[in-house]
Image (spheres, coloured by chain):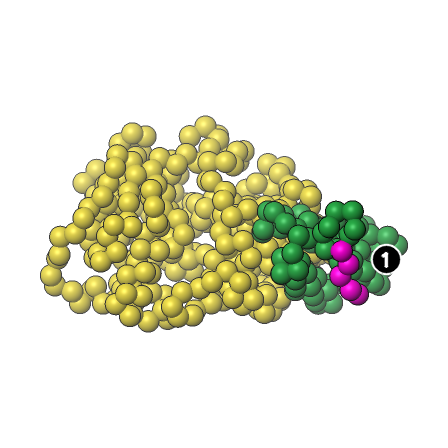
Chain colours: A green, B yellow
Amino acid sequence: MATETNPETGKLEFFLDVPFPSSREATIALRSLSPDREPRRGGISKQLSVSGSTLSVRWSADEARILRVSVNSFLDHLSLVVETMEDFGPPVDL
Amino acid sequence: MTVVIGFEGSANKIGVGIISDGEVLSNPRRTYITPPGFMPSDTARHHRAVILTVLKEALEQAGLKPADIDCVAYTKGPGMGAPLVTVAIVARTVAQLWGKPLLGVNHCIGHIEMGRLITKSNNPTVLYVSGGNTQVIAYLERRYRIFGETIDIAVGNCLDRFARVIKISNDPSPGYNIEQMAKKGTRYVELPYTVKGMDVSFSGILSFIEETVFAMLVETTERAMAHCGSQEVLIVGGVGCNQRLQEMMGVMCKERGAKLFATDERFCIDNGAMIAQAGWEMFRTGRVTELEDSWITQRYRTDEVEVTWRD
């Protein structure tokens, strides 16, 4: 997992793929982690998506420092989702 | 029977409460106390460390399983960003794990609905006073109208900063310790008293005494009562615990033949059950929050919410 500079946009990009036990759980994580806006309005954006049972996150940032803050914060939140799932899962049958 | 679980963590208290048709089944809470004051990221870290434990306590103390819950309510705002997100994330996750609808609640309305439930007041003029908020509120036609508010800092913030200046302990809260010291006071010092119509200002009088700030709040509450023809006052918010404030408000109410309502520290200080109660009211009128719309917000005015559960 390394950061790359996009030659077209000049922005720093970082991709993260997180495997989950099932597609349902990956989607739960996506819907828990996507609603809130980045605290910092400019200089950073991220996209979350689910494919199969993998949650994928793509960041695009102007500066390394801004990227680092956002990624760290995301990882904290992700670990909270995972811990919540461990303590209160598995998801009920719908 | 409708059972709602509420998650609150917009400032330094993290609470999870469960309400079933007006009965508080559980309401555990933890407070993050740190000198000299609490910062958003440290507070979020504190909440993160304890929230799942508090959630388990709430379920255990209520004697319920997740299947017994009908709705998951959480604080949408206002408040500090990082702590709000931490709590919202857990609420969204359990709502999905348990297959229950989600409800974003306005923190101030949580205080109001808890106050109405506990005191059984009918249609009171509300004084909402805490570390983060100071508002005089009256209900009219489906909105909690903000009649008056602080034009700068909240009265609780003023008290907290004063406590910091004179180096009073933060444990259990700065305001509580100021109150205990003030009980032994004998001299009244006249300080700038700033009321502008319906509004108040506290930033100019950081070297204040309770008498002055509380008198300002009693005046603006009385003005709102006069405008609305109201015969009830309800005090909510952490500063509402203060006996002197209740005493002074009581004197004004007695003079007007009005009734004063207040709750004890379990419910006037931020707690999870108040979010559950406001959520219960909203849920009964068919309101839910879709996950995509469940973002938190640091600014969320009390009058932005359509109060569909009152006439």
A72 is within the stretch colored magenta: no
Q: On the rendered structure, is B95 left or right of B81?
A: right
Residue at the right extreme of this rendering: A52
**The image quarter in which residue A16 lies:** bottom right
* Circle 1 residues within 10 Å: few <14, some 14–19, many ≥20: some
Residue at disc 1, secondary structure: loop
Residue A93: image location, x then y, percent: 82, 54
Residue drawn at (54%, 68%), measured in percent from left and top? B46
Report how many numbered discs are placed on residues in the image. Answer: 1
Q: On the rendered structure, is B54 left or right of A88?
A: left
Residue drawn at (82%, 52%), measured in percent from left and top? A50
Residue B158: image location, x then y, percent: 31, 55
Predominant SS along the magenta part: loop
In-front residue for pair B256/B162: B162
Residue drawn at (54%, 42%), measured in percent from left and top? B281
A4 is within the stretch colored magenta: yes
Residue B143: image location, x then y, percent: 46, 33
Residue drawn at (58%, 51%), measured in percent from left and top? A39
Residue A33: image location, x then y, percent: 69, 54
Q: On the rendered structure, is B65 left or right of B205?
A: right
**Residue at image mark 1:** A53
Q: Chain of mark 1?
A: A
Residue A93: tell me if it is visible. Answer: no
| Span highlighted in magenta in the image | A1-5
From the viewer's perspective, is residue B140 above or below residue A8? Answer: above
Disc 1 marks a residue whose amino acid type is Ser
Residue B42: tell me if it is visible. Answer: yes
